[in-house]
Amino acid sequence: MSENITANAMGLLKSEAKSLNFYYGEYQALKNINLAVAEKRITALIGPSGCGKSTFLRCFNRMHDLYPGNRYDGEIMLYPDDVNILHAKIDPIEVRMRIGMVFQKPNPFPKTVYENVAYGLRVRGISNRRKLDEKVEKALRGAALWNEVKDRLTSLAFNLSGGQQQRLCIARALATDPEMMLFDEPTSALDPIATASIEELIAQLKEQVTILIVTHNMQQAARVSDYTAFMHMGEVVEFSDTNTIFTNPAQKRTEDYITGRYG
Amino acid sequence: MPNQSTTQSVQAIRTMIVRHKRWDIIFSIVGLFAMLGGLLTLVALIVGMAIDGLPRISWNFFTSFPSRHADKAGILSAWVGTTLVMMVTVLSAVPLGVAAGIYLEEYASKNWMTDLIEINVTNLAGVPSIVYGLLALGLFVYQLDFGQSVLTAGLTLAILILPIVIVATREAVRSIPGTIREGAFALGATKWQTVSQHVLPYSTAGILTGVIIALSRAIGETAPLITIGALTYIAFLPDSPFKGEFPYVSFDWLSSAFTVMPIQMFNWVSRPQEAFHYNAAAAGLVLIVMTLIMNALAIYIRYHFRKRIKW
Ligand SMILES: Nc1ncnc2c1ncn2[C@@H]1O[C@H](COP(=O)(O)OP(=O)(O)O)[C@@H](O)[C@H]1O
Ligand SMILES: [Mg+2]
């Protein structure tokens, strides 16, 4: 769509979806999506429930490969090495090692706080205790959780509060230094105070990592993101810098949505 | 007069409620009798057995072989046999059953084949145990030539409980939320890493519970073991699995003849002298206590892990 911001105007790109279609079996959930993700910026996906935000997000770490019958068509390029991460020859595991994900509901493993954060490192074959200690601490600090849990690293993750659990999941994803992080409505299961702390954290994280975040909370998108895409019925209706989307949307459908006329 | 008609209709509602509630009362009485009927029979059985058997239970009862003299006879060969057979059963049924359950749940693609297997596995759990005995007689005794041994008995009971272990494993695995698996995959874990480091450890409690319940079924099985030729009178012990000198373990006991608790009981009950019936009651008590301990263990494990894992 001509109103959409072009990749050229966005500076350095981390990733770019090109003519992306996605099918759950026969059902086409994503339709010809073109969207660029700027490096070390926060890109938000907004839109009514069921419009395909999660589906789109989960293409970026090939989560759909876990279930039979799903099919991608088109490309998602990852830069700087210019690789199409949807290509059949690219192992989804390689993609997931480069791109981390935080889910809607905190999903810590029923292990200790320490083991949760260390898990991604262990998967990568790191078992040296000193190195693990160091990386776990760094990740927990990165997720603004260190001070709260440094004395209970060996207690079970389930004993943390909901907001702490979600920050633990962020630390878990951060520990392996991903190039990009995907957030799927990371605060929708949390109370307002926990939500505020997670938002603040995400805003800080963009200094070190590219972020793609799904939210159905428009204030959240407006507060934290640099770019926003409005999705509707499997399509990206409008994509622009966040300020433009919220103050001067080009599309009627976008305006209707952000002014609360539907969704 | 609106007031009066209201009173009337309230009156009508009340009589209706009373009428409807009669069924509550009737059912609670019928249900009470049904429950008491079942429970009291069971209690009477156990109490009867305890009265007959308790006086026979002593240290000697556990350390003596069966004998022609009822007051000297004991269950040594029976409980040792039961223990060894159960060991073979556990060591073969658990790895096989858990692997099969995990494969079906996590690896196999879902199609008509796996549906068919699923239906069959569930049905196998209900096949009469003597049928397994017949199968084992043909396979283990005649085909594989394992003899009428501890090994054959253990494997027979293993096949018998395999479906239960598979079903328990699948249920335990299925109760792990998909978001936990996705969490592991999202960090770059392979399927095997996800299964061995998450799925299996988190479903241990469920699997163990299923295994123990399966074992408490197997421990009382008589028919299939008689079918494969368990002896009813044994006055020796199988060779010890542990040795004083190198290599410290021995597997000769696997090929030993054997008897088990329920068969020992069966033998005693079928004697004409009443003194032997008391022995059977005593052995029955021991068997019940063994089963109760196993069930208590299952409950404890479930409770213990529940405390640790909340989804
Ligand atoms: N596993 C699935 N199989 C089939 N259809 C699905 C599946 N997951 C989601 N969908 C459908 O795809 C559409 C987009 O879903 P989703 O991406 O979850 O929306 P959102 O995250 O924007 O609420 C919805 O119509 C939904 O019903
Ligand atoms: Mg969603």
Image (cartoon, coloured by chain):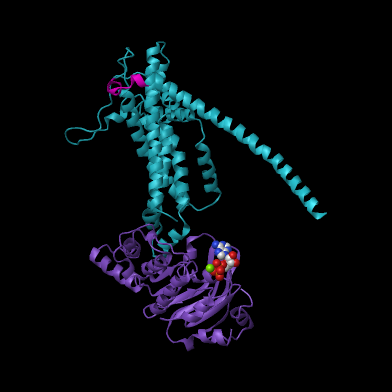
Chain colours: A purple, B cyan
* Side (left or right) of A184 relative to B285: right
Would you identify the image quadrant in which residue B17 lies? top right
Total tally of numbered discs in the picture: 0
Query: Does the magenta stretch mainly form a helix, a strand or a loop?
Result: helix
> Which region is colored magenta?
B54-64
The C terminus of chain A - image quarter: bottom right
* Residue A64 to residue B66: above or below: below
Frontmost residue, A9 versus A114: A114
The N terminus of chain A - image quarter: bottom right
* Side (left or right) of B181 relative to A218: left
Residue at the outermost top position: B273
The picture places residue B299, in percent across and down from the top left corner, at 41, 41
Give the residue displayed 42% in from the left and 22% down from the top. Answer: B49
Say if residue B283 shows up in the picture: yes
Say if residue A24 shows up in the picture: no
The picture places residue A45, in percent across and down from the top left corner, at 52, 76
Residue at the outermost right position: B1
* Residue B95 to residue B160: above or below: below
Residue at the outermost left position: B245
Give the residue displayed 40% in from the left and 16% down from the top. Answer: B277
The picture places residue B140, in percent across and down from the top left corner, at 39, 30
Give the residue displayed 40% in from the left and 20% down from the top. Answer: B51
* Residue A3 to residue B165: above or below: below
The picture places residue B18, in percent across and down from the top left corner, at 70, 41
* Residue A47 to residue B45: above or below: below
Query: Does the magenta run of residues contain A176?
Result: no
